[in-house]
Amino acid sequence: MQHAIKLIRDELAAFYPDVELQSVSRLLISKITGYNFTEILVNKNTIFSEHQREILKNYLEKLKNGMPVQYVLGETEFCGLNFKVNESVLIPRPETEELVEWIVKEAEPGSVVLDVGTGSGCIAVALKHFLPASNVYGCDIASDSLITARENAEKNNVRVFFFQTDILMEKKSDRKYQIIVSNPPYIPLQEKEMIRPHVKNFEPGRALFVPDDDPLLFYRKIAQFALSNLIPGGKLFFEVHRDYGKACVTMLEEMSFQHVQLRKDIAGNERMIKGRSTT
């Protein structure tokens, strides 16, 4: 195993800073061996089999080509849960965990919740895990994303109702929700060249980018949907681009949402919004 760790560091030193390389190394070794961090230390003299060496070689080639480690391994952690990820879905981010924590604190017991643009299902599955009495729904335009989301619900032993729809066209639901949440596409296309290659070259563009002339497109459409499909006093939660938080707040207030709040994430960026429906 020490040889494998040295190989990882030699092969990937040019691609990752030292701290991140240590993390990537542990993730690769853990995936191949099934060992946790402590077990890796205890079993550091273990010799890899030929099969394990071939798996490691395959991982290293993908990483050197820029593929995110989460896609290479096919999984990641979110809110303490394990999720399958692939190139049909975004990789869950830590700031989205903060959004989930906010919703969990705000939700009434037995709430009916909708996650719009569910992707991997990470928000919907985590909410059902932490709010087991709630009925949680997740929708997405992409059938391949929904396949992954359903697998993640099964993987984490929760029941979430997933369905396919284009929220830009959707107006009326056959049910009312206490909570609607979304982490929609919000990066203007003009920023694409500034995005790190492992994001723009591998993560699905449909979940990242919006037209330069309408960066609030999805927020406006989802808010319009929420006005018709939230119960009176129901809550709408968004993750937002750090440069468009205030503009999104203004838009929601103009649409008659009440008590609109803009929150900063742990890094100090304005990334989360909550509004309350009055209709």
Image (cartoon, rainbow, N blue to C red):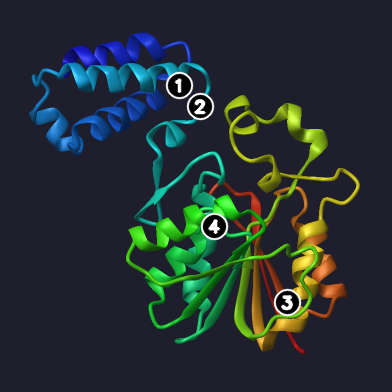
Query: Is any atom of residue 102 visible in this view?
Result: yes
Task: Give yes or no for contact between labels 3 and 4 (Cβ–Cβ under 8 Å).
Answer: no
Closer to the chain start, of discs 4 and 1, is 1
What quarter of the picture does the C terminus occupy?
bottom right
Could you tell me which residue is drawn at 21 percent across and 21 percent down? 51
Closer to the chain start, of discs 1 and 2, is 1
The three-letter code of the residue at mark 1 reads Lys
x and y percentages locating residue 70 in the rendered image: 43, 37
> Which of the 4 image quadrants contains residue 42?
top left
x and y percentages locating residue 128 in the rendered image: 43, 71
Q: Which mark is residue 226?
A: 3
- Tell me: residue 247, above or below residue 228: above
Could you tell me which residue is drawn at 82 percent across and 34 percent down? 190
**Disc 3 to disc 1, how far (Cα)?**
41 Å
Which residue is disc 2 drawn over?
67
**Disc 2 to disc 3, how far (Cα)?**
36 Å
Which residue is disc 4 drawn over?
146
Q: Which label lies toward us, 3 or 1?
A: 1
Q: Is 40 left, or right, of 219 in this rendering?
A: left
